[in-house]
């Protein structure tokens, strides 16, 4: 895989930063150009290096087993860290991610005396990113060296469904909120997700932070710290927490990437968020049915969050959520065994808050799916295979025995 030297073009108030990508094995699976669109006001913040492009595409090259050559310079710190990044990803999923070699035209100068002062986190409007953001506002973070200065919003990154009106609404609403709070808002459009052709859910969960941090690296002259918002606590299964190990390994000479909120549960995050009135019109977690700043109340994220807000007695304050919890949707959800821990966790939350109704709902969905995956589905598969076996054998016999084939023909004819 070859990453060509980046190209910068301007259009109105926007700046397009792109790199042509040449891949022999993935020519039919990925776009031929990786591009990012950022506000033109950040043109002076772009470093000369190619760190952002290498970071965003390394998981893709690892999955394809392709070595990378970067036309341009790369941070010495990033190159050093990527050795361990690759080893860690390969250790957990060797069948998916190979260790690849990368070459480059030159090393980026590492003469930075002090990191840029900008502190950024991504902001999707969800509980995790809102907790990270809120925790670094001046009223909660007294040390000015750690107070939030920038937020990053990547369009269509928070949902598998691309809905342009929803994205425009979020850009306007979140931009207005950040302006009110005197925080720089950085909206970004990119086709980086289109390169992750291997997105089978699990692989994407392990690698998507590389795209977020890659964007922060693109404006490396402005941003010195990037806080990645942890999805879950450290004790969750590996599929949901490997990013806690990988994120710091995407740091460069200029940018320190870290993980925030991994020691705080979802309910503890919501406890903080419900005390912030600005969240009442901006908290959006909907995954399956994007509709502006409105949550459907039916998808898994909506069900969990509405139940949590109801346990806290705050659901009626939120204009972005339905006024009631759809308990039937909680109970009827299909869930793969890899994600059973979600139902276990929310049942524990409900038990801690004395909500027997939700204890029942989340316990019910857990056992329902256990029965489906470990009893009903295997039995169904067994009998389906048993019924089909004679037909498979008959087909093979017809291929290898002319006598048998003529016999079957006569039987069918008569």
Image: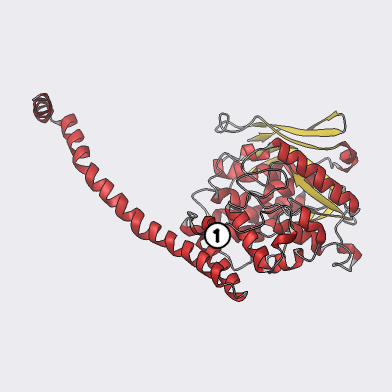
User: How far across and how far down the image is residue 240, in percent?
Assistant: 59, 59
Quadrant for residue 186, please give it.
top right
What's the residue at 22%, 45% (across, down)? 387
User: How far across and how far down the image is residue 177, in percent?
Assistant: 85, 51
Foreground: 34 or 290? 290
Mark 1 nearby-residue class (10 Å; few <14, some 14–19, many ≥20): some
Number of labelled discs? Answer: 1
Foreground: 345 or 403? 345
Foreground: 114 or 175? 175
Q: Residue furthest top?
A: 413
Quadrant for residue 104, please give it.
top right
Which part of the image, by quadrant, shows the N terminus?
top right
Give the side of residue 414 with respect to residue 262, left or right. Answer: left
User: How far across and how far down the image is residue 13, in percent?
Assistant: 87, 33
Colour scheme: secondary structure
Q: Is residue 278 above or below residue 161?
A: below
User: How far across and how far down the image is residue 100, in percent?
Assistant: 59, 45
Q: Is residue 72 above or below residue 95?
A: above
Q: Which residue is mark 1?
A: 327
What's the residue at 77%, 53% (across, down)? 281
Q: Is residue 403 above or below residue 339?
A: above
Foreground: 18 or 152? 152
What's the residue at 75%, 60% (across, down)? 317
Give the side of residue 165 with respect to residue 302, left or right. Answer: right
Residue 257 in view here: no
């Amino acid at each position: 895989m070859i990453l060509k030297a980046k190209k910068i073009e301007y259009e109105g108030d926007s700046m397009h930063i792109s790199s042509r990508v040449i891949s022999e094995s993935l020519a039919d699976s990925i776009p031929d150009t990786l591009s990012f669109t950022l506000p033109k006001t950040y043109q002076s913040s772009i470093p000369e290096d190619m760190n952002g492009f290498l970071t965003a595409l390394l998981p893709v090259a690892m999955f394809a087993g392709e070595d990378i050559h970067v036309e341009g310079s790369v941070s010495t710190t990033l190159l050093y860290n990527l050795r361990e990044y690759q080893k860690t990803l390969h250790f957990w999923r060797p069948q998916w991610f190979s260790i690849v070699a990368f070459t480059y035209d030159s090393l980026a100068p590492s003469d930075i005396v002090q990191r840029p002062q900008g502190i950024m986190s991504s902001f999707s409007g969800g509980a995790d990113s809102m907790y990270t953001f809120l925790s670094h506002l001046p009223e909660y973070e007294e040390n000015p060296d750690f107070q939030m200065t920038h937020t990053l919003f990547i369009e269509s990154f928070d949902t598998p469904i691309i809905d342009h009106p929803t994205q425009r609404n979020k850009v306007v609403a979140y931009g207005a909120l950040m302006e009110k709070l005197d925080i720089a808002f950085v909206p970004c459009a990119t086709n980086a997700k289109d390169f992750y052709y291997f997105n089978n859910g699990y692989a994407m969960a392990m690698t998507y932070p590389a795209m977020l941090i890659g964007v922060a690296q693109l404006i490396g002259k402005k941003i010195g710290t990037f806080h990645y918002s942890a999805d879950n606590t450290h004790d969750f299964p590996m599929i949901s927490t490997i990013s806690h190990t990988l994120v710091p390994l995407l740091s460069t000479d200029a940018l320190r990437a870290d993980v925030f909120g991994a020691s705080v549960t979802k309910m503890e995050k919501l406890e903080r968020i419900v005390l912030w009135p600005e969240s009442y019109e901006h908290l959006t977690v909907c995954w399956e049915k994007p509709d502006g700043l409105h949550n459907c109340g039916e998808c898994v994220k909506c069900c969990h969050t509405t139940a949590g807000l109801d346990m806290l007695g705050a659901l009626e304050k939120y204009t972005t959520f339905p006024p009631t919890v759809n308990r039937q949707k909680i109970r009827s959800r299909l869930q793969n065994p890899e994600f059973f821990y979600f139902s276990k966790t929310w049942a524990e939350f409900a038990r801690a808050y004395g909500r027997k109704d939700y204890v029942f709902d989340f316990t019910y969905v857990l056992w329902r799916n256990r029965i489906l995956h470990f009893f009903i589905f295997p039995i169904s598969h067994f009998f389906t295979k048993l019924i089909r076996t004679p037909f498979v054998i008959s087909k093979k016999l017809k291929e290898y025995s002319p006598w048998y084939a003529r016999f079957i023909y006569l039987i069918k004819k008569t």
